[in-house]
Image: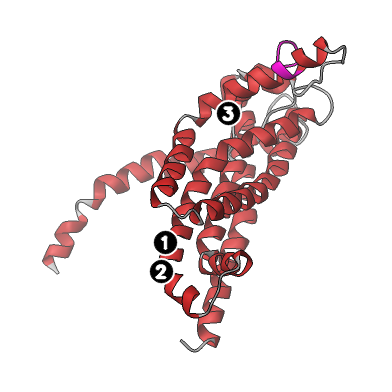
Amino acid sequence: MKSKYKNTIWLLPALFIIITFTIVPFFLQISDSFQVSEINNMNGYQKIFSDTNFINSITNTLFYLIVPIFTISLSIAFAYIISQLSSKFFKKVSIDLIYLQYLFIGVAVSAMFAFLFQTNYGFINTIREANGLEPIEFISSTGFNTTLTTSLYLLISSLPFYTVVISYKFIKSIETLSDKFKMNNIEKDYYKFKILLSENKKIILNLFLLVSFQMLVSFPIGLFGNLDNMILNNGLTIVGYINYMINISNSVNASAASMILLLIIILYIGPIYFFNKWKIKERRFSWNY
């Protein structure tokens, strides 16, 4: 017991850091978000919901929650293809090559999108103009093009990491289940695929929640170059809006937007996570192992 009490002393520095840099700023942000302006007599929440930039940012952020569906689906498909390679060497090389893309993805994808999709000098529009066609405004202040282009950017940026993780899980499952596949004469890809999904459904759901969180806090400034271009082209996300408010020293709006983002994260990710936990417990209770 004495040893345990002594060991708790080592937790005090960490506790001090958490309180100083996390808990106290959190409550200060809550307080700031309700601060009423003397100019228009509105608190932070009233101000941001009357701000067009915030409405655009929350609309974009919620739309990007579609991206995880495609990210995880494509990652599963690529992972299954890799797991079915007969050569261990090619499996390893494939995963390593995909992971290398993840390491350099931020700069590489931004540069690639700038090269391909810029309205004035992008590769696609250069070809279109050379053939007498009008350029396409992939990133535009009007229309839906910016949102679609950014969605594609976020998809490609997030895809390598999840492909690698699911590939390793599938390969491990196949090694574990190979004898059972042979004993039960399971040779068709359809049945193998279903079994792999069933065996790895927990990790797949957790990865879906992770990529969803990644989309909620996305800040794809590399695609636009700077905050001014993000605003000009209606490309703000909630995190981008918070950064913009901090840059112009509007802590009230930044605090209110931070609280709204936290609420969205809790309302979106929380129910999915706890429902999954409940279903797992329910199955464990009802099944005979």
Secondary element at tag 3: helix
Tag 1: amino acid:
Lys
Residue at image mark 2: 176
Please report the residue visible at 56 percent of the width from the left and 40 percent of the height from the top: 158
Q: Nearer the viewer, residue 166 or 54?
A: 166
Question: Is residue 70 visible from the viewing direction of this image?
Answer: yes
**Mark 3 surroundings: few (<14), some (14-19) or many (≥20) residues within 10 A:** some
- Specify start and end residues of the magenta stretch as a single range: 118-124
Nearest to N terminus: mark 2 or mark 3: 2
Mark nearer the N terminus (1 vs 3):
1
Task: Tell me where residue 4 sits by quadrant.
Answer: bottom left
Quick check: marks 1 and 3 in contact, CB under 8 Å? no
Taking 9 as reference, is 89 left or right?
Answer: right
Q: CA distance from mark 2 to mark 1?
A: 6 Å
The answer to whether residue 23 shows anywhere in this view is: no
Which x, y percent locates residue 16?
31, 44
Q: Which mark is residue 265?
A: none
Label 2, label 3: how many angstroms apart (C-alpha)?
A: 54 Å
**Residue marked by disc 1:** 172
Instruction: Measuring from the top left, give residue 38's x and y in whole percent.
Output: 69, 26
- In this figure, which residue is indicated by the disc labeled 3? 251
Could you classify mark 2 by the number of other residues whose Cα lies within 10 Å: few (under 14), some (14-19), or many (20 or more)?
few
Residue type, mark 3 in image: Ser
Circles 2 and 1, Cβ within 8 Å, touching? The answer is yes
Q: Is residue 123 magenta?
A: yes
In this rendering, position of residue 164 left or right of residue 49: left
Q: Which residue is found at the position 25% from the left and 45% from the top?
A: 13
| Residue 260 horizontal side relative to residue 210, left or right | right
